[in-house]
Image (cartoon, grey):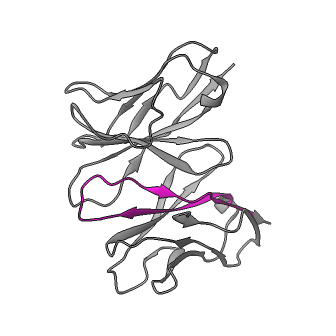
Amino acid sequence: NAGVMQNPRHLVRRRGQEARLRCSPMKGHSHVYWYRQLPEEGLKFMVYLQKENIIDESGMPKERFSAEFPKEGPSILRIQQVVRGDSAAYFCASSPGTGIIEQYFGPGTRLTVT
Amino acid sequence: AQKITQTQPGMFVQEKEAVTLDCTYDTSDPSYGLFWYKQPSSGEMIFLIYQGSYDQQNATEGRYSLNFQKARKSANLVISASQLGDSAMYFCAMREGLNNAGNMLTFGGGTRLMVKP
């Protein structure tokens, strides 16, 4: 059973460009979480999605950031008009859902904004 | 107030010795879980150990054990017989409201452990 997949692993964008980060959850998992890790800090929750629904986006910046988890295909975290402060590692985690405690993390995407 | 506090930004330990990494938490929810993750220099998050708030016994996984003191709201990670490969960042995390599907993890700021040969 393949783990959580994220791509790309490294992404370089210039200020003002768009960044698209992809996350394929583990097989059978319908819950996806996105976290951001700034340099030398712990992970901070951004958004929680189930298939076709955003359940909790309380950690998502109000502007430029959006997330989706379509019926088919990976979850996408989209950052429009990136700025230097968006440089971070973005982790996706997945879980089967109700009654399951653990979230399984992907390897992360390291975004660098130049 | 911080929900998860890790007061040791960095620690050294001699190879083969035991080390304790501190974690205190703050919650009013009676149902919660505490997690420890390891993040090596390669960057991935590796799950180490889990303790539920209603668990009667301290969790253990191989060389890892969790010293859970509920009244003090602490969940310290103990690594026995340290190995060079244990050098990494260690994060304590909490999930509140275990009865609700999908609650997020809240992470502490981490402790960087360095194992000396």
Residue A97 in sight here? yes
Q: Looking at the image, can residue A76 be seen?
A: no
Query: Whole-percent x and y of residue A10?
Result: 57, 26
Q: Specify whether residue B112 is painted magenta.
A: yes
Determine if the magenta segment contains residue B108: yes
Q: Which residues are magenta?
A: B87-114
Residue under the point 49% across and 40% down: A107
Q: Nearer the viewer, residue A75 or A54?
A: A54
- As drawn, A26 above or below B103: above
Residue A11: give x, y in percent of width and height. Answer: 57, 22
Classify residue B50 by image quadrant.
bottom left
* Viewer-nearest residue: B64 or A88: A88
Rendered view: B77 above or below B105: below
Identified at 43% across, 83% down, the residue is B58
- Which quadrant of the figure contains the N terminus of chain B? bottom right
Seen from the viewer's position, the closer of residues A88 and B47 is: A88
Residue in the picture at 79% in, 66% down: B116
Q: Is residue A111 above or below residue B36?
A: above
Q: Position of residue A20 (x, y in %)?
A: 45, 21
Residue at (25% x, 43% y) in the render: A29
Residues A40 and A9: in front is: A40
